[in-house]
Image (tube, coloured by chain):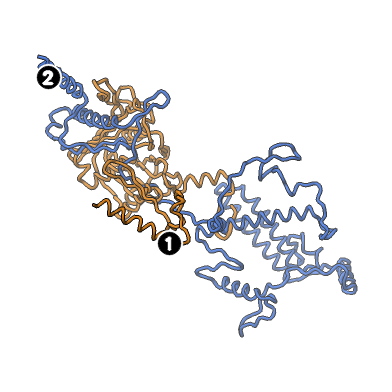
């Protein structure tokens, strides 16, 4: 009797279980492929076209979708869950479908010079605090940067060391040293970047370029020539090579207390020039200047007409002024240095008329 | 920007952050998509594009306000230019003309060059507003279901499947709230057509832990027809899939398991000088200057003999 009832109970229990599972079980010929990481399910079963046409399309699709979603949900529910702030959350595994990347993977950066050295010596990075206690100001200040704790350049009193020149400016010296360190650091940083990106940087002199033009080559030759101990003064030249044009100083200044004779001469000449009623004039230069000015005026007028048509008037005045100013300065410069009164500010006042 | 013969580096932290955002990364962010209208668009197309935007709205960028007179299949340079400027790798281009009515091109880029482009024609379209039902909140990660053999057998359909996954996937998350699994996108490939339906899933009580699903149609529904495709060559496709080495899970060496599941590892020792080994010191066994060792041996031998007998 008992055995019968036990069997009955078991059978009943099984039936109940089956019923329960009925609501969530779906029968499919082929199992679906799941990618839980992407919440993705792929159904490979053949869809009977006849079924599709018999039922209404939407209903057929909906029932198919319902079945597939049920299977996907069953799969998702198999994953481990946890409770996060009053919500039950299921942890998803990593996505299994390979999808193409957006951009190619980054190339690993080559280590900088310091990193290589540290690796060689086995130097580890020590974590440092951001703020340091400054005794004089009695507060926490930054370790580096704006208003840092021990600022070398901001001291109000610097003792002159015994070995130093008494007339030297110690404050300026410190500021200059800091500037040099900053510049050196920046230079090294950029060199590291250049090494990382494999861009060629010149150690000293010029960078080699793949296709060199005539100017580049002549520049390279002159740089090579002047990089000798005597700055290229005793270098032989090729038979047809011309001496370089722009060597030496661009401006020559006479020493302050030097040759009194020449200085006197120069001053007297200048006075004579300023005294003479006739302006010192170079006829050809004046004529050329006048012609150029006329051409420019014509061009400006044409442009103004054209601009007026298109409605762009605003640019004109700026252009005219710019051109005029440049022209005046250029012409002033072209006249020899001594004649300061004549050429400088005049804008093409013709001498002939 | 400070310069040293061709190296340009950002001067401000903000510009540096901007450039770092756009630089290639080990683990990439969510892909953004740009949605564009072509030279001529119909009402269906504009409505369809807008609906797609609302369906996956979290990560999109749209250029709906300007008509771009380009033909992606002929000249993709303007697409690539836009992609570079906006840093988007997916695009959706809608257009309408007599020859190809209600045309929609799904595409994706690799390294700002077109990888895949698939042109679909919208035959039937029911918009979001036409279906009266309560909608899912925006930004929910949708569940994607693909049905039909074609998605497994036909090459073009396979690429289309991958493209659609890319588009509608949403951000990659490690965990999902169970109650928030509402949105379902169902794609069926049948008779050369692709039916896309969007449902809201209601989790009903079933006898056991896993709920029973009931679906309610929301969202836009499309009946699509596959038109032209421009798929990437196999090498380019493979190249695009190449993952950086750092992402590969490192296998832990020197771990082995026996039948019972006990973990074993090998410990490698240097060669030891056994004479200098630290053991318990027994005074009697200490080495003495003399022939004590021989005595021991003799002592031991008769013992052995005794036992045997």
Chain shown in blue = A
Residue A11, which numbered label?
Answer: none
Q: Position of residue A323 (x, y in %)?
A: 66, 57
B170 in relation to A197, above or below: above
Residue B291, which numbered label?
Answer: 1
A215 in relation to A8, above or below: below
Q: Is residue A246 left or right of residue B276?
A: right
Q: Position of residue A218 (x, y in %)?
A: 59, 74
Q: Is residue A18 left or right of residue B282?
A: left
Which is nearer the eye, A289 or B93? B93
Q: Position of residue A264 (x, y in %)?
A: 90, 71
Please name the residue shown 70% across and 43% down the image.
Answer: A149
Give the colour in which the image draws chain B: orange
Q: Position of residue A17 (x, y in %)?
A: 19, 22
Q: Secondary structure at mark 2?
A: helix
Please name the residue shown 74% across and 60% down the image.
Answer: A347
- Dot 2 surroundings within 10 Å: few (below 14), some, or many (20 or more)? few
Residue A7, which numbered label?
Answer: 2
């Amino acid at each position: 009797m008992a055995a019968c009832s036990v069997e009955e109970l078991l059978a009943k229990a099984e039936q109940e279980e089956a019923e329960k599972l009925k609501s969530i079980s779906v029968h499919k010929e082929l199992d679906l492929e799941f990618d839980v990481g992407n919440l993705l399910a792929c159904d490979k079963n053949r869809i009977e076209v006849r079924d599709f046409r018999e039922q209404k399309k939407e209903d057929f699709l909906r029932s198919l979708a319902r079945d597939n979603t049920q299977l996907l949900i069953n799969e998702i529910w198999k994953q481990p869950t946890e409770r996060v702030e009053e919500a039950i959350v299921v942890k998803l595994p990593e996505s299994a479908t390979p999808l193409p990347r957006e951009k190619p993977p980054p190339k690993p950066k080559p280590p900088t010079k310091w990193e290589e050295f540290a690796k060689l010596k086995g130097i580890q990075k020590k974590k440092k605090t951001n703020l340091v206690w400054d005794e004089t100001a009695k507060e926490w200040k930054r370790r580096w940067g704006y208003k840092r704790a021990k600022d070398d350049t901001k001291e109000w009193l610097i003792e002159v060391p015994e070995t130093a020149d008494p007339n030297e400016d110690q404050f300026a010296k410190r500021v200059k040293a800091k500037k040099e360190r900053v510049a050196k650091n920046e230079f090294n940083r950029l060199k590291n970047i250049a090494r990382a990106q494999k861009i060629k940087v010149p150690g000293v002199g010029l960078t080699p370029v793949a296709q060199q033009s005539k100017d580049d080559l002549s520049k390279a030759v002159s740089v090579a020539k002047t990089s000798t101990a005597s700055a290229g003064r005793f270098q032989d030249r090729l038979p047809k090579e011309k001496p370089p044009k722009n060597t030496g100083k661009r401006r020559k200044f006479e020493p302050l207390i030097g040759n009194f004779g020449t200085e006197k001469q120069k001053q007297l000449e200048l006075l004579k020039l300023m005294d003479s009623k006739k302006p010192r004039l170079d006829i050809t230069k004046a004529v050329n200047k006048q012609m150029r000015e006329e051409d420019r005026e014509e061009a400006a007028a044409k442009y103004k007409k054209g601009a007026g048509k298109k409605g762009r008037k605003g640019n004109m005045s700026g252009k005219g002024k710019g051109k005029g100013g440049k022209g005046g300065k250029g012409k002033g410069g072209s006249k020899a240095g001594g004649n300061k009164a004549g050429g400088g500010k005049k804008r093409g006042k013709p001498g002939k008329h | 920007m400070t310069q040293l013969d061709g190296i340009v580096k950002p001067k401000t932290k903000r510009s540096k952050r901007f450039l770092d955002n756009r630089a290639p990364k080990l683990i990439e962010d969510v892909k953004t998509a740009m949605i564009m209208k072509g030279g001529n668009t119909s009402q269906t197309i504009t409505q369809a594009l807008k609906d797609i935007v609302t369906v996956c709205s979290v990560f999109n960028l749209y250029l709906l306000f300007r008509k771009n007179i380009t033909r992606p299949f002929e000249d993709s340079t303007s697409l690539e230019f836009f992609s570079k400027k906006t840093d988007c790798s997916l695009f959706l281009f809608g257009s309408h003309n007599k020859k190809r009515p209600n045309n929609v091109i799904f595409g994706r880029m690799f390294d700002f060059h077109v990888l895949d482009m698939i042109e679909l024609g919208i035959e039937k379209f029911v918009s979001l507003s036409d279906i009266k039902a309560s909608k899912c909140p925006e930004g929910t990660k949708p569940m994607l279901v693909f049905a039909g053999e074609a998605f497994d057998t036909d090459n073009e359909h396979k690429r289309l499947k991958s493209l659609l996954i890319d588009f509608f996937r949403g951000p990659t998350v490690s965990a999902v709230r169970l109650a928030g699994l509402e949105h379902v996108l169902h794609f069926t490939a049948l008779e050369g057509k692709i039916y896309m339906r969007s449902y809201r899933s209601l989790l009903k009580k079933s006898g056991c832990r896993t709920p029973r699903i009931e679906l309610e149609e929301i969202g836009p529904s499309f009946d699509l027809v596959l038109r032209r495709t421009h798929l990437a060559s196999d090498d380019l496709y493979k190249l695009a899939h190449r993952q950086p080495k750092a992402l590969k899970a490192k296998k832990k060496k020197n771990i082995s398991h026996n039948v019972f599941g006990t973990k074993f590892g090998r410990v490698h020792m240097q060669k030891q000088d056994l004479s200098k080994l630290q053991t318990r010191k027994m005074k009697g066994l200490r080495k003495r200057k003399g022939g004590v060792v021989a005595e021991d041996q003799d002592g031991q031998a008769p013992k052995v003999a005794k036992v045997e007998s």
